[in-house]
Image (cartoon, helix red, strand yellow):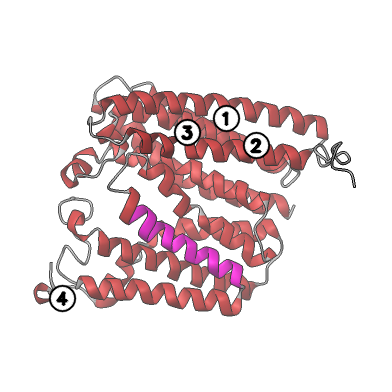
Amino acid sequence: MATSLADILFAAIAIAVTVAQAFILRSTARGMRHAAPDTRAGLEWAYAIAPAVALAALLVAVWLAMHPGTIEVRGVAPGIRS
Amino acid sequence: MTTETVTRTRPLAADLLTLTKPRIISLLLVTTAMPMYTAGSPDLFTVFVVMVGGYLMAGGANAVNMYYDRDIDDVMARTRTRPIPAGRMAPQAVLAFGAACATAATFLLGRYVNVVAATLALGGFYAYAFVYTRWLKRTTPQNIVLGGAAGAFPPLVGWAAVTGGVDLRAIILFLIVFYWTPPHFWALALNKQVDYGRAGIPMAPNTWGTRETIDQMWWYSVLLVALSLLPACIGMLGLPYVAAATVLGAIFLHDAWRVRRHRDADTAAWSAPAWKLYKFSLLYLALLFAAMAVDRHL
């Protein structure tokens, strides 16, 4: 697949994933209000957010794989030269 | 249920096969074998050993699951005829069978494939038997979401069996199965709410309500279909796969939307569409993974 086409596809996927994940979290919040009051809200939120974090990490990893060399260390910071 | 009450009315071999949940494993084997052909061109012996090892590992996990769930299996209509609640097998024998299967699988995969594949398969066993069954299943409505990780190990095993490791491409396959699990399983859980409620399992429909569950099924379906196209972005798969994933994804979204359209209606309205989504989701995953393997060898 040509690079430009891959970039367009990636952008479309990233938008769809972000929107879907946002609605999933919103629905989870609404669902937790239906749940019994003794539900451990903090833990439930951690469970809900963990897949979203993993998804964000995946998108970053895919983007870096599509654009190798995008992030590189440019020299040594001033003040720590030997 | 104790050993004293065990009565044998069915061949032992049939019960041992039931403990492994063969119908569920058949899909797991597809998601193990297809990534092997997506990763490369494995020899038939390796594929055979991975299939046998994969069956034993997943079958062992399913047996241990039946051991731990024997109390709730007894009160759910769907599971009441399983070997332990029906009184045909002693719980300890089921646990021993599960452990033996997992041990044999670890040996087979470690000795004849590689250590990484064996370790990942064992990781899947622990994730299902302990993290999902013992921890998540009875404590949170997110059980299916997080527990989906256990069912997503097979692509990692298949990939590692061929390449000797796991990379970004394998992780994408893992996440496709991971995000396929919520719409797939909640479509079943919607129609089994009474059973799960009787057993006290906090499934999403019983805890969050039908409307929120159906809403999340839709958004997880969107997520799944989007993620299924990700392999094309990194050149892992080409246009034939993209075409197959798009068509399959469109059908999946259509079926999920038919459920969502009736989310505020009563059970009669969404029950049949939910069953249809459940059945198609099985076919979807098998065909999607088959399309990956075909694309790599075109």
Most common secondary structure along the magenta stretch: helix
SS type, badge 3: helix
Magenta residues (range): B115-133
Q: Which chain carries label 3?
A: B
- Which residue in the structure is indicated by mark 4? B8
Distance, label 4 to label 3, CA atoms, is 43 Å
Mark 1 belongs to which amino acid? Val
Which label number is shown at residue B220? 3
Q: Where is residue B298 in the image (x, y as percent from the top left)?
A: 75, 52
| Badge 2 vs badge 1, beta-carbon distance below 8 Å | yes
Spatial separation of the CA atoms under disc 1 and disc 4: 51 Å
2 and 1 marks on the same chain: yes
Magenta-span inclusion, residue B117: yes
- Disc assigned to residue B32: none
The mark found on residue A59 in the picture is 2
B78 to the left or right of B297: left
